[in-house]
Amino acid sequence: MSRTSNSAVSASLNQLTVNDTHSSAASDASKVSNADVEKQVQQSETAPATATPRWWESKSLEHKPLDSAYGWIVVASGCVMLMFSMGCVNSYGTYQTYYHLEQFPNEHVSTLSWVGTLQFGVMNVFGIPAGILCERVDTRLVSFVGGVIMAIALIIASFCDDAIWKLIITQGIVFSIGASLVFIPSTSIPAQWFTKRRALAVGIVVAGSGIGGLWLTPATRAMIDQLGTAWALRITGIIIFAVNTVASLFMRSRLKVQTRDKIVDFSVFRDMRFLLIFIGAVCATTGYFTPLFSLPSFAQQVVGKSESFGTNLLTIINAASTVGRIGTGEVARLLGNINTMAMCTFVSSLSILVLWLPFQVGGTLIASAIVYGLFCGGFIGLLPVVMADLWGVQRISTIIGLLYMANFAGTMVGAPSSGAILDNIGNGTNYKPTIIFSGVFMLCSSMFFVVLRVIVSKKVIERI
């Protein structure tokens, strides 16, 4: 009896304890719930009245599927815009040949090369603010403004062809600022729309620069011959404005990038993989422009070919570059993006040191132009893809902008140094020191990418 009574009392006490616990928990939950409600009310009072983006901001399209039909529209848009931005840069050799032989015969080649150098160099260093704009402003607006700036720059340059320094400012610097606002969204946004065919998609986009150079080079040559440089610049500027305005309407970002406290995140420079890509890109761009700027004049001065033959070499490089930028996308699916990028820079160096350097024959110049175009174009097309693979598409705009600082450094060193070597060491006619300079830097680039490959994966045979 006593034991039963004690058990009952104990059970009652336990029940009371449980009830108190439940009551306390309910009270705490009520307090937490009330606190959450008060917090939500405060947030709603301080939050903006509407969540819709402002007119200059992009809307998120993450609900749209990857590898969709609209992604290919974005690819086509980027391809067309690069056709004129990078196409004009790649075809500058036509202007430089005319400036050197006709319009400014007393100017040094190194001085004339500053126009093309700054076209590419400033475009790359301005990639950082362009990347920031792409994360905060609708990419359609960014690319449209870029087209307007390019068109205005060329039209103003058409009235400034009496002094080379005026062309350096207009055709060189101002044009490149607009080209950067077109180039960064065109190379970064298409990667957001694809996973399976990302390398192919980006390859098609960057092939636009080769396509542009392919037809802009002979078209520019024809306009200069028939109308002069002034009207060649004006007509090109008008076409850029019209075509870029339409193409920019479709350059829509898929992801809504979260705004970060830091405007530019330089922490990526602490990543050894990025440093290797950065230094490799510096070396590659240091040697990249020598064939584009010097091969036509080499064919005329050294080999004794006609002016049209030199222009056709540029056309061949741009045609091969178009094929290379698309084709390496498929090759990269089999070999891996980093493997293919290292291979492209290595073979590019061989086309300079093995095919161009030892020979002074038209046939080997054509072979060198074909091989160089195929593989240097592939390297350019794979850079954004490797960036997306290693760091994701969310940060790709700003990371590509940082990477293209390397292109700026390489360009500012490469093209002027190449021209200075030709003027001072080669006395304006001996191209061998210039050719060696270009080929060695391209070879060094491939070595840095090989080291990157080893760091990413130590397996000898692996698609990476």
Image: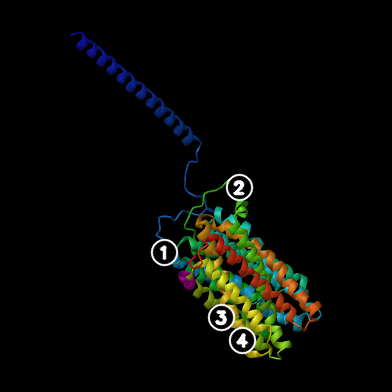
Image location of residue 264, percent across then percent down: 61, 51
Q: Secondary structure at mark 2?
A: loop
State the residue in front, 211 or 412: 412
Q: Given this view, does label 4 or label 2 mark the residue nearer the observer? A: 4
Q: Position of residue 282 (x, y in %)?
A: 66, 65
Residue tagged 4: 366
> Which circle's residue, 1 or 3, is located before the other in the chain?
1
Q: Amino acid at mark 3?
A: Ala
Q: Which residue is mark 2?
A: 262
Q: Label 4 is placed on what type of residue?
A: Ile
Q: Is residue 180 above or below residue 359?
A: above
The residue positioned 45% from the left and 67% from the top of the image is 73
> Which numbered disc flags the more N-terminal residue, 4 or 1?
1
Residue type at numbered disc 1: Asp
Residue 67 is tagged as: 1
Q: Nearer the viewer, residue 457 or 204?
A: 457
Query: Considering the numbered disc 1 on the image, is that residue within a helix, a strand or a loop?
Result: loop
